[in-house]
Image: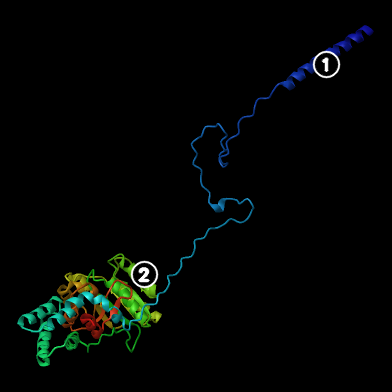
C-alpha cells in the first residue's frame, strides 16, 4: 500500500516538473511584431538624422497665420493693411501778378520780337531796307500780315514826328504801339460767376497734343487760388489716361471729378458733371472734352452735341480754345474750324515759353475776334497765367 502511494506521489511530481518546463518555454517565446501603423498625413515630416539621405521634400499645404495655434494660447494675430493716406491738398500760388513772375519765360520771344525791333529802330538811318527788316521781324514772329502793316505805318509816322530818337524814347514808343496792337481794352476775365445761378460752366476744347487736359487741371488750380470751388467733368472718354490724369489734377487741389466708362458718351459725362456741380453747390464746373482733329467732321459735330446737352442745364459761360503757340499759322486754321462748331469765347495759348512766335497772340485775336485769356509759360503746376497785355509787352521788350 505504501509502495502504491509513493509511486503516485512520484508520478505527480514528474508531471508537475514537465508542465513547468512547457509553460516556461512558452513564456520565453517572443510575440510577432505588430503591423506598422498607417502614416499620419497631417503630421509634419520627421527631422532627418545624421547619416540619413536627403529626400525630395513633399509639397505640403501651407497654413495661414490664422490657422496656426499660438503656443501661449493667445488670440491669432491679424495683419491689417495700413490705411491709404488721403492726398495732401495743395495751395496754388495766387494768380494776381503771376505773368510778371513768369516774364523771364518769354526770353525767346523777347529776343526775336521786342529786342529785335528795338535794335532796328535804333539805327541812325531808317531807310526802306530797315523798315522791310522790321516787317520781316514781325511776320517771322507770327504777328500776321494785316497787324504788321498797321504797326509799321504807325511806327513810321511817330518816328518821323519824333525826330530825335533816344533809346528810352524808342522803347516807350514801341511799348505803346505793341500794347495797342495786343489790345488793352478786351475783357480777359474768365467768366465763371454768372449772377443768376451756380455753377458757372466752362468748356475746354482743342486738338490733340495742345496740352488740353493738363491746361484744364491747371485752370482748376487758378480758380481754386481765386477762392472758387470746382467740379471737373472728364468728358474725354476716348483717351484711356485722360480721366485719370484729370482726376489727379483735381485731387491735388480738392476738386471733385465726374467721369464715365472708357469709350462712353462724352455728352452724358458732361451732363452729369453739371448736375453734380449743382448738387454740391460748386462755383464752377470745368468740362474737359476729347482732343479732336479739326479735319474730322464727325468728331467736331459731337463736340457741338456736348455743348447742346450741357445747355439743357444752363448756358455755357465760357468755351476756351487751347492752342499750341509753337504751331503758328496752323493754329489759326484750327481756331477757325472750332469757332464754326462752338462759339469760342477765349483763347488759352500754351507753350508760349518755347517759341519765338510771340506775335501769335495778336494774330489769333484778330482771326477770332476773341481775347487771349490765359497763357502757359512752363511745365509747372502754377505756370498758367491770366494774360495781361502790359506785362506781356514789357516782357517782350525787356527793361
- Quadrant for residue 118, please give it: bottom left
Mark 2 closeness class: few <14, some 14–19, many ≥20 residues within 10 Å: some
- Quadrant for residue 316, please give it: bottom left
**To which residue does mark 2 refer?**
248
- Quadrant for residue 254, please give it: bottom left
Labels 1 & 2 near each other (Cβ < 8 A): no
Q: Locate residue 142 relative to residue 93 in the image: left or right.
A: left
Q: From this view, report whether residue 24 is shown above or below residue 230.
A: above
Numbered mark located on residue 258 in the image: none
Q: Residue at x 53, y 51 (%)?
A: 64
Q: From this view, report whether residue 206 is shown above or below residue 314.
A: above
Secondary element type, mark 2: helix
Q: From this view, report whether residue 17 is shown above or below residue 102.
A: above
Secondary element type, mark 1: helix
Q: Residue at x 34, y 86 (%)?
A: 197
**To which residue does mark 1 refer?**
16
Q: Whole-Å distance between the Cαs marked 1 and 2?
A: 106 Å
Amino acid at each position: 500500500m505504501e509502495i502504491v502511494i509513493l509511486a503516485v506521489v512520484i508520478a505527480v511530481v514528474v508531471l508537475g516538473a514537465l508542465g513547468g518546463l512547457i509553460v516556461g518555454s512558452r513564456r520565453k517565446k517572443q510575440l510577432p511584431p505588430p503591423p506598422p501603423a498607417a502614416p499620419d498625413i497631417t503630421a509634419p515630416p520627421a527631422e532627418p538624422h545624421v547619416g540619413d539621405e536627403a529626400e525630395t521634400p513633399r509639397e505640403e499645404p501651407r497654413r495661414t497665420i490664422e490657422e496656426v495655434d499660438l503656443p501661449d494660447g493667445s488670440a491669432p494675430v491679424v495683419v491689417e493693411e495700413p490705411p491709404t493716406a488721403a492726398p495732401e491738398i495743395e495751395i496754388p500760388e495766387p494768380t494776381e501778378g503771376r505773368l510778371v513772375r513768369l516774364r523771364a519765360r518769354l526770353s525767346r520771344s523777347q529776343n526775336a520780337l521786342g529786342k529785335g525791333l528795338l535794335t532796328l529802330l535804333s539805327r541812325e538811318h531808317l531807310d526802306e531796307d530797315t523798315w522791310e527788316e522790321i516787317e520781316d521781324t514781325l511776320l517771322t514772329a507770327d504777328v500776321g500780315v494785316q497787324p504788321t502793316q498797321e504797326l509799321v505805318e504807325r511806327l513810321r509816322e511817330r518816328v518821323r514826328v519824333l525826330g530825335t530818337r533816344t533809346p528810352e524814347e524808342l522803347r516807350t514808343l514801341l511799348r505803346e504801339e505793341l500794347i495797342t496792337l495786343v489790345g488793352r481794352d478786351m475783357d480777359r476775365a474768365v467768366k465763371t460767376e454768372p449772377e443768376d445761378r451756380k455753377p458757372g460752366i466752362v468748356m475746354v476744347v482743342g486738338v490733340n497734343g495742345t496740352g488740353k487736359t493738363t491746361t484744364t487741371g491747371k485752370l482748376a488750380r487758378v480758380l481754386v487760388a481765386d477762392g472758387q470751388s470746382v467740379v471737373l467733368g472728364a468728358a474725354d472718354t476716348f483717351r484711356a489716361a485722360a480721366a485719370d490724369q484729370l482726376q489727379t489734377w483735381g485731387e491735388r487741389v480738392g476738386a471733385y471729378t465726374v467721369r464715365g466708362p472708357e469709350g462712353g458718351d462724352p455728352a452724358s459725362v458732361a451732363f452729369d458733371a453739371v448736375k453734380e456741380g449743382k448738387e454740391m453747390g460748386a462755383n464752377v464746373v470745368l468740362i474737359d472734352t476729347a482732343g479732336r482733329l479739326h479735319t474730322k467732321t464727325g468728331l467736331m459735330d459731337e463736340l457741338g452735341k456736348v455743348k447742346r446737352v450741357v445747355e439743357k442745364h444752363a448756358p455755357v459761360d465760357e468755351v476756351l480754345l487751347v492752342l499750341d503757340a509753337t504751331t503758328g499759322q496752323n493754329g489759326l486754321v484750327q481756331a477757325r474750324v472750332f469757332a464754326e462748331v462752338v462759339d469760342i469765347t477765349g483763347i488759352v495759348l500754351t507753350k508760349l515759353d518755347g517759341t519765338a512766335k510771340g506775335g501769335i497772340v495778336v494774330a489769333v485775336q484778330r482771326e477770332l475776334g476773341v481775347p487771349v485769356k490765359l497763357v502757359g509759360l512752363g511745365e509747372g503746376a502754377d505756370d498758367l497765367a491770366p494774360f495781361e497785355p502790359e506785362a506781356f509787352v514789357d516782357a517782350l521788350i525787356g527793361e
